[in-house]
Amino acid sequence: MTLPRRLAMLGVPRIRARLGEALVKPRVMVTTARRYSQTSANTGQGAPFSNFTYTNGAPNGQFNGASSADTYRYSATYRVQSFGFTAADVPDEAVIIGVTTFVTRRGSGSTPRKVTERFNSIAISSQIGEDRSTGALISSVQTAAYGGVQDTFGLTLTAADVRNIDFAVLTAANFEFYQGLSDCTLWLDAIGVEITYLL
């Protein structure tokens, strides 16, 4: 019996077919559990925030505020980071395809005073992503989501990037009709993030 016929009898072609199936097996999409920031800071111009510890961790009803004070047309850009993602959450071989941010906030200032979205994005070190703000009114307590499972804010991210302590979420608001009126304020409770990747 020839060698090819012997190999055929042993099922070698079937083994090769199964190996081929394994090689083209589709990747699985994974979304991490939501993680919350542990450090924060004011960046850029605008009304500053001061009670930074209030925005550390999950929502707890403590709000860090930035007010117009008849001086500012917008808040400082609030930068939060140190989300604590590890290799167990996002392994080295993960292909990052999406980032979803969650901003728990409220605005105060009755008509005609109002607080609206100004800027919402992510950053890795000094590289800042695209803005996903809509200009929506901020009033009662709400958790607004930005980005998505297939949106990286225009950035190309690696597993190492999202595990880096410099991986950050940025948010800011506009203060409208502020002159000669009482303050209007952006209040922030917590900022979380979920990472979506292919594995």
Image (spheres, rainbow, N blue to C red):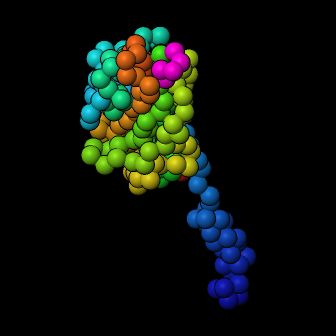
Query: In the current view of this chain or complex, which residue is farthest to the bottom?
Result: 2
Majority secondary structure of magenta residues: loop
The quarter of the rendered structure image containing the N terminus is bottom right
Which x, y percent locates residue 141? 54, 17
Quadrant of the rendered image containing residue 13: bottom right
Which x, y percent locates residue 62? 42, 10
Please state the extent of the stretch shown in magenta in the rendering. Answer: 110-114
Q: Residue at x 32, y 26 (%)?
A: 72
**Does residue 8 belong to the magenta stretch?**
no
Side (left or right) of 149 relative to 90:
right
Q: How many marks?
A: 0
Asked if residue 33 can be seen in this view, the reply is no
Quadrant of the rendered image containing residue 144: top right
**Does residue 112 belong to the magenta stretch?**
yes
**Residue 149 vertical position relative to residue 2 in the rendered view, above or below:** above
Side (left or right) of 27 relative to 13:
left
Asked if residue 76 can be seen in this view, the reply is yes
